[in-house]
Image: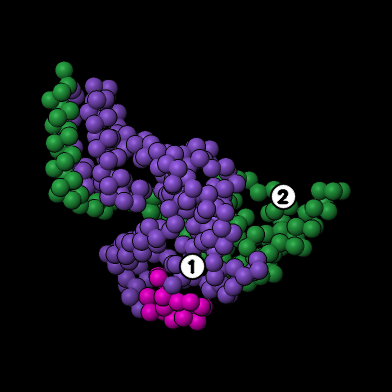
Amino acid sequence: MTRLFRAIWLVLTLRCEEADRLRSVRAMRDLTRSERLAERVHAGLCKSCRHARKQLDALDHALQDLRETSDAEPVPMPAETRERLERALRKRSDDRP
Amino acid sequence: MEPGLDPSRWLCAHGDALYAYARQRLGDAESAEDAVQSALLAALDAADSYRGQSAERTWLTGILRHKIADTLRQRYRDERRAEALRRELADPSDGTTGVFSDGRWAERQPAWADLPVGRSGLTGEAERREFQKVLLAAIDRLPPAMRDALVLRELEGLETDAICEVLGVTPTNLWTLIHRAKAKLRKELTREWFNAEDGNDLKKAARSRGDREDPATA
C-alpha cells in the first residue's frame, strides 16, 4: 500500500528536471517501476519532455558513434612531443638488459 | 623482443592515433603526452609478453587506457581538483543553469532533426566528421569533472563502480555529473549544430542542412 502511494505521489509530483535526470541515468542504473511509470506519464503530458527524450536518445547514439570511430582521424602529434617520446623510448631501450 | 615491436616504428605507425586518443580523453596536451609516454614505456617493458593475439594498435591502446585511468585517478587525488569537484557537485544549478527554472524547462525543448550519425557516402561521411568535431568541442567545454565523468562513461565505456573509483565520487554524485553533462551538451548542440534557440529556427536550420544532403543517400 505504501509502495502504491509512493508511486502515485511520484507520478503526480514529477517535474521536468527530475524526469530528465531519470532519463539521463537509465543506462547506468535500473529505474524502479514507479520511476519508469512516472517518467512515461510525465512525458505523455509534456511536449518538451518528449522532445528532450528524443534529444537524449540522439545524443547517446552520437556518443556511441564517436566511441566507435574516434580513432579514425588521428591528430598529428606536435614535433617536439614526438622528439621527446623518441628520446624517452631510445633511453629505455638502451637501458634494457 | 618480438619482431615488429620496434619502438620507433610504434611512434610512426601509431603515435598520432594514440596521442589523439589520449588528448581526447584527458583534455589537455601535457597529460596526453605523459600518458602516451608512460604507455609506450610500459609496452616496451612488456614487449616480451606480446603474443600477437591482438593487432599492435589494439594492444598499445589497451595499455594506454590503463594509463589514462591512472592519470585521472591521480588528478582527483590532487586536493585542489577534489575541492573543485566538491564545489561543482554542491552547486545545484551547475550545468543546468538556464535549462530549468523551478524544476520545469526554462524554454520549450525543440525537436531535433536527425543527427548525421552512421551516414555513408562522401557527403554523409563529411557531415558526420563535421558533427563529431562540434560534439568533441562541446565536450571539451564542459566543466572538468563533468567532462571526465562523461568521457569515462561514454567514450571509455567504464562501468559505474570503476568510474566512481577513479573520480572518488559516489554513484549518486556520478549520476548527477552525467545528467548535468548531457543537459549541457544538448543545449550546446541545439545552439552550435542546429544553430537555433527554439523550434522555429531549428526547422529552418534542418531545411538548410537538407539542401546539402548527399543525393546518393537522400
The label number, if any, that marks residue B26 in the structure image: none
Q: Residue at x 46, y 70 (%)?
A: B190
Q: Tell if the residue under mark 1 belongs to the same chain as the one under mark 2.
A: no
Count of all numbered marks drawn on residues in the image: 2
Which amino acid, mark 2? Answer: Arg
Image quadrant containing the C terminus of chain B? bottom left
* Mark 1, other Cα within 10 Å: few <14 / some 14–19 / many ≥20: many
Q: Chain of mark 2?
A: A
User: Helix, strand or loop at disc 2?
Assistant: helix
Q: Colour of chain B?
A: purple
Image quadrant containing the N terminus of chain B? top left
Q: Is residue B6 above or below residue A19?
A: above
What's the magenta region?
B192-210
The answer to whether residue A58 is seen in the rendering is no
* Mark 2, other Cα within 10 Å: few <14 / some 14–19 / many ≥20: few
- Magenta stretch: dominant secondary structure: helix
Residue matched to label 1: B187
Which amino acid, mark 1? Answer: Lys
Q: Colour of chain A?
A: green
Q: Quadrant of residue B141?
A: bottom left
Q: Is residue A3 magenta?
A: no
Residue matched to label 2: A33
Left or right, residue A8 beside residue B191? right
* Colour mapping used in the image: by chain
- Image location of residue A97, percent across then percent down: 16, 17
Q: Quadrant of residue A16?
A: bottom right
Q: Is residue B183 above or below residue B7?
A: below
